[in-house]
Amino acid sequence: MHQGYEGRVDFLTVYIKEAHPLDEWQMGTNVEEDVCYRQPRQFDDRLAIARDFISRFSFPIPLLIDGIDNRVMNLYSGWPERFYIIDPMGIIRYKGVPGPFGYHPEEVEAWLRENVGESTLSETTSEAPTA
């Protein structure tokens, strides 16, 4: 989706607190995918995890890091994951339901098709990486 709308839509990811850290609620898939981290207690810890993610997964979308006070996460009710479409004037045009059950990239893609136009890729994908 990011590639198909590149140059017409700015994509941005905000890394918030860990949803499944080692020291809280670890998931088996985290172990299988070797993405096991403790819940960051300092901003530098969160920064290190974000850098590791970008490096290991060649993540192409700009990644902002929420402060350790979780201000952005709380303001946007982003835990554990959530999509928003915000127009250039700062108006929220689409607000997805929090994931994992409300995490629907295909809804974002449908909104973009209707409001921005077709993707430039011949075949789009509804899969989006998560942080």
Image: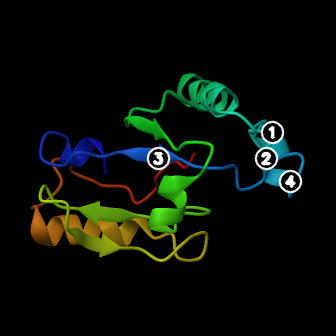
CA–CA distance in space, label 4 to label 1: 8 Å
Counting residues from the N terminus, which is met first, the one under dot 4 or under dot 1?
4
Q: Foreground mark, 2 or 3?
A: 3
CA–CA distance in space, label 4 to label 2: 7 Å
Which residue is located at x 12 percent, y 59 percent? 89
Q: Which residue is mark 1?
A: 36
- Asked if the residue at tag 1 contacts the one at tag 4, i.e. Cβ–Cβ closer than 8 Å, the answer is yes
Q: Foreground mark, 4 or 3?
A: 3
Asked whether, in this view, residue 104 is left or right of residue 84, the answer is right
**Residues packed near mark 3 inside 10 Å, few (<14), some (14 to 19) or many (20 plus):** some
The percent position of residue 18, horizontal first and vertical second, equals: 70, 49
Counting residues from the N terminus, which is met first, the one under dot 4 or under dot 3?
3
Counting residues from the N terminus, which is met first, the one under dot 2 or under dot 1?
2
Asked whether, in this view, residue 106 is left or right of residue 44, the answer is left
Which amino acid, mark 2? Asn
Q: Foreground mark, 1 or 3?
A: 3
Q: Hey, which quadrant is residue 39 in on the image?
A: top right
The percent position of residue 86, horizontal first and vertical second, equals: 24, 61
Counting residues from the N terminus, which is met first, the one under dot 2 or under dot 3?
3
Which residue is located at x 80 percent, y 48 percent? 21
Asked whether, in this view, residue 57 is left or right of residue 72, the answer is right
CA–CA distance in space, label 2 to label 3: 19 Å
- Asked if the residue at tag 1 contacts the one at tag 2, i.e. Cβ–Cβ closer than 8 Å, the answer is yes
Q: Describe the element under mark 2 as helix, strand or loop.
A: helix
Q: Describe the element under mark 1 as helix, strand or loop.
A: loop
Q: Which residue is mark 4?
A: 26
CA–CA distance in space, label 4 to label 3: 21 Å
Q: Which residue is mark 2?
A: 30
The C terminus - image quarter? top right
Q: Examine the rendered structure and indicate whether residue 103 appears above or below residue 32.
A: below
- Asked if the residue at tag 2 contacts the one at tag 4, i.e. Cβ–Cβ closer than 8 Å, the answer is yes
Q: Which residue is mark 3?
A: 14
